[in-house]
Every structure is written in structure tokens, then in C-alpha cells.
Image (tube, rainbow, N blue to C red):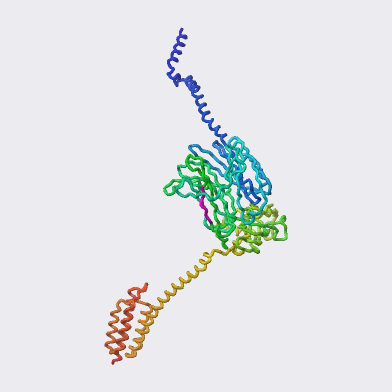
Amino acid sequence: MGSRGTTRTCRSRRRKSRCRSGGLKMTGRHQFRACVRSTGWRLILGLLLLLLPSSAHAEDWSVEAGIDATHASTDDILIYTISVIGTGPGTAVLESEPNIADFTEMGRSTQDRIVNHQGHSSKSKEMIFRLKPKRAGRLVVGPATIRAGQHSYETDAIEIDVVDTSANSGWGLSPPVGGGSGGGGSGGGPGGSGPGGTGVGGTGTGAGTPLPSRTYPKPKVGDPYFVELRVESPEVYLGQPFFLHYDLYVKADRPSEMYDVTDPDFPPGLLTREPDQPSYGIHNETRDGIRYRVEEKIRSYILQPIELGEVVLSPLAVEVPRGVFSSPRDWISSPSDQVFVKPLPPNPPKGFVVGNVGRHLALDATLRASGVGTLSDLKVGDSVVLMVKLEGEGFVDQMSLGPIAQQSWVQSFGPEVLSDEIEVDFTQIRGVRRFRLTLVMMEEGEFEIPPVTFDYFDLDGARYSQEQVGPWSVKVEGFGPNADAILEQAAARREAELDEAVERPEFEALPGLRALSPDAPPATAPYTRWWFALLMAVAPLTFGGSLAVTAWSRRRAKGAEQRRMDGAHKQAKRALRAVGKELGARTVCSSLSAVLREYLIERYEIRARSATAASLERLLAGAGVAEELRASVAALLTELESMSYSPEGVSQPASAALLDSVNDALDELESARKGARR
């Protein structure tokens, strides 16, 4: 009975402990397990619901490939673009490259963007290839495989008809003109044709739409959209690369979208390539009280001028929507600009660099031991001589000799230019340059002297090439007879470089085929613009004329003053000579003349001039001087009275001392007069 009663009591107690919600009180081990069972499944289901949309978004990728022209020539540069757009996690990578065996790859670049629209964000990536056909005929760009998220997508092959022509040969490269064709991916999105270079795939048309003309409206500040062009400097040197950026300004109330863009048609005087790592950014800016969202660098280019004079920077066309929620779109254009290309300076500033560009460039280099040994039988302290010869035409600003400057086993001396046979005309430099570099072996062992190299843009082949000679292997064993002295000299040079805080470069810079050093004539070109020639002719005459007029006016003023002083001095000498003749006191009159001459020459101002004049008049009146002499002295005093010189640096004590000297002279003159009268 007791046991049974206890059981009923426990069951009754459990029934009473249940809450209205059907749960258990959070007391005891049984209550905790029951709570975990009731809430754990809810938590798992909630996490699954959160993860399911993410996994669905991982499949939302669109991969498209297109080329900007299906009809081209062997001299054209084609733009092949792979576009990837998605909203899922992860990123897009090129898993297998397209087959471009029939083309020469001129360069490639990648552009990444993040677009936010109505609270949804999407990522886009463009892989851009610059291709030049190797031959004429029907060429094919093979499919490429893109890994986006957790899946792989394959693009379609694209065919291009290429004709053999040399219409675009010469200094510049004309950009291709024609329609764009789209090649869709297996996981691609909607089809369509791109505006001359951004054709999309899927079920897109094969011919594409033609390139838009460059006569589109150029909106300004106040419009919903406008494009601005930014250039680093309005003046550049011949062959000096510079950046060109295009920025899109969008009103803050307009949503972010994807915009179709056409590449500008740059003139033949500019070599064009896209930056290897283009940077893209967004910031807000207020113009005339209107808030804009600035999408920076929607297109960026590295341009290298190869012609002198003014070069036009072409506008960029962008397709933008008409309204906030309208599907029709219109093309707008940026304004054009220009840069002035200057000749290369004869004495370039520190850090001056121009790009390497030319044709028929050839590099030759030989390495030999300076003594009787060979490269495989060298000793510490021996030296080897690297003789380099570069010939061709164009601009080779600088060559390099590998990372030899940082090595401890060798000390370099030079380079020393031996001879130059360089001719400079309007646009380029041609000829031969020879120089040598001496390398001193500092340690024992087997070493490799790196090759002499330089990269350049080949104008004939329309591609970037590299010239290289070397490397060379050397073996150093033992010490030479003069090793101690040579090593001491090399160590002293290195110590001097450290004392002067000279940073040892990563590469040994070698002089190229350029007119940038005193060893070669400067690259100059005549300016043919009449206004510039007139300005250069008139400017020296104007400047020289102004200097001559200024000097003449100063000389005239000084001459008038000097003549006035000389006249007064002559008049004083005549008056004093008459006084001396009358009184017979030549010594006293000479001293008085010297005092007055000093007064005139030094241009002192005697502030008590009236008292001096009165004393002199009284002296002359008492001496009974003739009337004409008195008139002459009175005229002298009037002339002195009218002259008012107050040069800087003359103090009042000096004037007072001079006045005392004049009074002393007058006293002596009066004493002489009295003695003569006796």
C-alpha cells in the first residue's frame, strides 16, 4: 500500500506540474531533456531555412563570352571578353583558358565590380584578352571553362573572318571596327547581342550590333548621367606612358546598374594598352548642389605617345537608362581632350622614364675575361668585361642586367659608353650604341651572370617583345696576384656608397638607345605652328627691349643729375677762383672748394644751408668784392639751395660735421682777407 500510494502521489504531482502551454517546468533532469527535444528540432529547421536560399543563390551565375568584331584584318587588335555575373558566394576563376592558337595575345586584364540595386547585390567579373590574328582566313577562339561558385561553366567557340591587309601599318595601330558576337555559356543567362564589344551569349545573334558613332550627346553637370575624362598631365614626353581614366557620374537617386561601354578610337599616335590591375571605386560628390555617385575608372588605359605635337584623346560612349524604372536606354559620350607631346629632354630629371618602343631592334653582348684566363678559370680579384651593342630605331630608355647589384660575390664598375652612332629626327632615334661593364670577382665559387634584357613594343609586329642575351656561367678558384689591392678598392667603393646612403638597385641599369645622356645628341624637333614660332621670335626682342628702355631711362636720369652737379661745381670753382684772385688766399679757397666739391659729389644735405649762405654773403660784402663776383656767388648759393639730396645712410652728425668744416673754411677765408687788407 505504501509503495502504491507513493506512485499515485508522484503521478498526481507530475500532472499538477504541467503548465497550460503543455511544457514542463524547468526543474530537474527530465524537464531539461524534454525542453531540448522540443526546441532542438525547431532550431535545426530554422538553420536549414536560412541555408537553403544561400545554396540556391550559389547556382545563380551567368557566364558569357563575346568578341568586339567578327570581321577584322591581320593588323587589327580584337577584344575578347568573358563576363561572369552572379549573386552567390564565392568567386569566378578561369579554370581552362580558351584556345587562341591562331592569335597573338597582346595582353589581358581583369575587372571586378559589385552592384547594389534595390537591396540586392550582385558580383560581376570581366576577363579581357587583346588578340591579334596571326593569319588570314576563318579563325576560331575556342571555348573557355569558368569556375563560378561550386560549378563549372563552358563558353561557346567564336569564329572571326580575317582578311590580309596592310592598310593600318605604320607607327600606330587602328582599333577594330565592326559588330560583336556573343557566345553563351552552358549556365548562361538571357541571350542578346552586344554593342560592339560587349556582346552576350546564350541565344545571342551572331553578327552583333555595329559600333555606335561618336556623335552622341555630351551631358554636363545637372543631368542624371555624365562622363568625365581624367588625364595625369596635359603635357608628356615622347614615349612616356601615362594613364587616362573615364569616370561616370550618376545622380544619387538613380539605382546602380550595369552599363555598356565602347572603347575609344585613339589616333595612330598613341599606343594603347589596358592596365594589368585596374582599380575601380565608388564615392559621393556634390556638384552645383547636386549629389552624384561617382563610379571611378569605368575604363582606364595606359597610353604611350609616339608622335610629337597635340594628340587628341577620344571620347568614351556609355549606354545609360532613360529613367529610373524604364527599360529604354540611350548612349551618351564623354568630352574629348588633348595632350601635348614634347621632345625628350637632353638632361632628364631623376626618375625620368619613357617606355621602350621601336622596330628593328637588335641586342648583342659578349662576356670575356680581362686577363689571359677564361670564364671557367678565374681567380678572386680578376675581372670580366661585358661588351654590349644595341642597334635599331625607336626608344629604348633602359636595359637591365638582372639582380647583380645586390650580390656580394661581384662588384660592378660602369657602364661606360664607348661609342654612339645615333641620329635623331622628328619622331625617333636610330643608330648604334656600344658600352661596357666591368665586373670584379669578390668570392670563390661557381656563379651565373644574369642576362642583359629589355622589354619593348615592336611596331612592326604590333606586340610586346623582349630582347635578351645571356646568361653566362663563371667559375672562380683561388686568389689572383693583386687580389688584396683589388678587393680593398672594391670594398672602399662599396663603403663609400654606404656612407653616401646610396641605395643599391635591384637591377643594374644600362643605357639604352636614347638621346637622354650627354653622350648622345638631344632629341629635338622643330615646332611648325606659326604662333609658337612668332612667340619664340618676339619674346626675346620684347624682353631685351624692355631691359634696354629701363637702362636708358636710368642712365638719362642719372646723366641729368650728374650734369646738374657738374654745372654747379664748375660755377662754384669759378666763383671761388675769383674770390681767391681778389683776396690772394689760394690755399684757403682750395680747401673751401674741396669741401663744396665733397658736398656736391656725396650729395649730403646741409639742413642749415641758409645760415651758411648768410655767412658767405656777409663775408663777401665786407671784403668789398666786385658786384659781378657777388652775383656769381649768389647764383651759386641759389643753385645749392635748389638741390635737395637726401641719400640713405647719411646721418645728421655727418651733415653737422660738414657744416662745421664749411664754417671753418669761411673763418680762414675771413682771416686771410684781413691779412691781405693789412
> Which residue of the protein is positioned furthest toward the bottom in this rendering?
678
The span shown in magenta is: 332-338
Query: Relative to residue 194, is residue 520 depicted above or below?
Result: below
633 left or right, relative to 13: left
Q: Position of residue 567 (x, y in %)?
A: 37, 82
Q: Residue at x 66, y 42 (%)?
A: 142
Pick whichever, 219 or 609, lies toward us: 219
Q: Nearer the viewer, residue 53 or 533?
A: 533
- Residue 330 is covered by the magenta coloring: no
Q: Quadrant of residue 673?
A: bottom left
335 in the magenta segment: yes
User: Image height check: is 530 above or below 66?
Assistant: below
Left or right: where 42 falls relative to 660: right
Residue 523, located in which quarter of the rendered image? bottom right
Residue 143: give x, y in percent of width and height: 64, 40
The number of callouts visible is: 0
Give the residue displayed 27% in from the left and 88% down from the top: 622
Q: Residue 118, percent across and down? A: 48, 37
| Position of 527 relative to 549 (above/below) | above
Residue 488 visible in this rendered orientation of the protein: no
Q: Nearer the viewer, residue 577 or 341?
A: 341
Q: Is residue 582 above or below residue 407?
A: below
Residue 270 visible in the snapshot: yes
